Image (tube, rainbow, N blue to C red):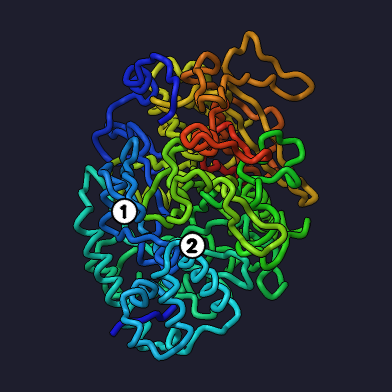
Amino acid sequence: MRYLASTALGAIAVSAAAILATYTGAPLQAAAPSRGAALAGDTYPQRPLWGDTHLHTTNSFDAFGAGNRLGPDDALRFARGEEVATADGQKAKLGRPLDFLVIADHSDAIGVTTDLYNTPAENLTDPTLRRWRDMMHAGPESSYKMTREVISAAQNGTLPAEMTNPKRLRETTRRVWDAQLDSVERYNQPGTFTAFIGFEYSLQLKGDTLHRNVIFRDGADKARTVLPFATQGRTGPEPLWDYMDAYAAATGGKTLAIPHNSNLSNGRSFMMTSADGGPVTAEAARNRARHEPLVEVTQYKGDSESHPSLSRNDEFADFGDAGWENGNAPLSALKKPEMFGGEYVREALKRGLQIERRTGVNPYVFGMIGSTDAHTSLSAAEEGNFFGKFTSDAPSPGRMTTVVNPGIQQSRIGWQYQAGGLAAVWAGANTRASIFDAMIRREVYATTGTRMTVRLFGGWDFSARDFRGDWVRAGYARGVPMGGSLGAAKGAPSFLVSALKDSIGANLDRIQIIKGWVDGAGQAHEKIYDVAWSSPLKRRIVKGRLMPVGDTVDLATATYRNSIGAAELHTVWRDPDFKPGQRAFYYARVLEIPTPRWAAYDAVRFKVAPPKDARLKDQERAYTSPIWYSPNG
């Protein structure tokens, strides 16, 4: 007996292959060199690899409870580009396959809702368990209600005793984990498609999200020696880091952790103090930086780059905020203004500089990636091909107006979900080792679903002449790529930055460099520089702001035209405000021209009127990992 225990439109006619050849330089033949190393005869990545580090399958208790019936095999097949059938019979297929995927099912209660569903009712003596089983069998709406009840009971400590039985939990976890490892190994094809082993550590303190996705560099031979690490009443990430260290010591293997949905943490994600209110120590800062080289900056449940209340001079700081800025994940606690600083990545990068100034160690040296957090087994980040956060949010005429948090006054509505979040990795080969190592060195970037190609290098002597030759080679040989650090100042730093449009997507609006720094008094600052943009002869910077690119979106047909914008942008930019004694970071943000959101596609597809306040178009974007400068080298 088993039972519960816990396609873009209007692309212009440009030869993407020709642009890519000019853009990337030498072809890919070997792994990328380490940052700043002279290349000699070595080569480097020709293109970014695209993936999702945050996908849930039927093994996650909330995914199954919300109606998902697709397991790890289905998820991996879909990510590779194969067609699958959803629980409600719809055909699902990616417009373009992914290069890699991390199945990150919740470590808490992994597989247990599946077990409850499959247990005969007469075998269940606990009335709550029997009622929850019957609710799952009654249909999607009832099943989703059951899932909310389970989550609420877990947060309130009122789960049935059989759900917290350690022996049963371990038996279920062992069985599900072993089967999932077998699936991942079956679909891992080095050089073609990389299937990673992983799980989600879903720490949530009174509803405040402190989740981490854990990724293994290794295969099942090492990962099978452990079980996914459950939260089980823990109050911080430190026990997870201890688990990661113990795994490394016992197996020689490697793992990394990626925080996500900091925008739903009510200020807990990037604190300036320790959990008990004391100062962050150098040891604590070093421990965090060593285990968490990346942060998930954008996903279905909102964007965590910045917020208008923090970046008042940033006209593009409101992407994906709608509905996700009013409280924590379950809206059990609403947001207070002072919480925003501990939730957004740009502010975390600034806070990291301040902590480093005091302790000598920066805990928030994050590279940036995006992912989906889909609970459908479908890693779909395409606006016109969005399958929803949960199976209950599958394409349908009413999903835009679905209430996400029923019974709560300041709830969220279906259209407020984002359809995006992708991880781009500059890895030398499509293998676990190469992709993982690129993540460790932070040579990665995030997009909101678009597949634009972005490169950023920092150094001391770059000039426009570099773009006349093999500029990527020059970037590696005389500087550092995104994720790297610049040593002692040799004048003002210069940056090579280039962006190539998604080959079947929208043209580019602009490239921005976002700088954060700490002054002599320890105060943090930021500034946004527009450094390259389309139609430079027509568009000027007026009163500190670049003229808008325009808008070709036709909401009546959910289409747009690439008659504005540029297919490629690049420039050399030197910091005009550089001061050698000030710690700083720099990252690139690249914006596309406006395009329809998934809600606009739904309105046309189902011939329904969207809610009057629904956001129907946006400027998709990419965020690179920063490059840091430290006066001490």
Nearer to us in this view, 254 or 110 = 110
Nearer to us in this view, 120 or 81 = 120
Mark 2 Cα-neighbour bin, 10 Å: few <14, some 14–19, many ≥20: some
Mark 1 Cα-neighbour bin, 10 Å: few <14, some 14–19, many ≥20: many
Q: Which numbered mark, 1 or 2, is in the foreground of this view?
A: 2
Side of 175 relative to 232 (left or right) = left
Q: Residue 585: x percent and y percent?
A: 61, 42
Q: Amino acid at mark 1?
A: Ala
Q: Is residue 428 above or below residue 121?
A: above
Q: How many marks?
A: 2
Could you tell which of marks 1 and 2 lies nearer the N-terminus? 1
Residue labelled with disc 2: 141
- Separation (CA) of disc 1 from disc 2: 23 Å
Residue at screen point 48% across, 26% down: 499
Q: Could you tell me which secondary element the residue under label 2 belongs to?
A: helix
Nearer to us in this view, 228 or 433 = 228
Q: Residue 231: x percent and y percent?
A: 49, 75
Side of 40 relative to 190 (left or right) = right
Q: Amino acid at mark 2?
A: Glu
Residue labelled with disc 1: 75
Q: Which quarter of the image is occupied by the N terminus?
A: bottom left
Residue at screen point 66% across, 70% down: 274
Residue at screen point 33% across, 36% down: 96
- Residue 215, numbered label: none
Q: Is residue 323 above or below residue 177?
A: above
The answer, for residue 480, to whether it is visible in the render is no
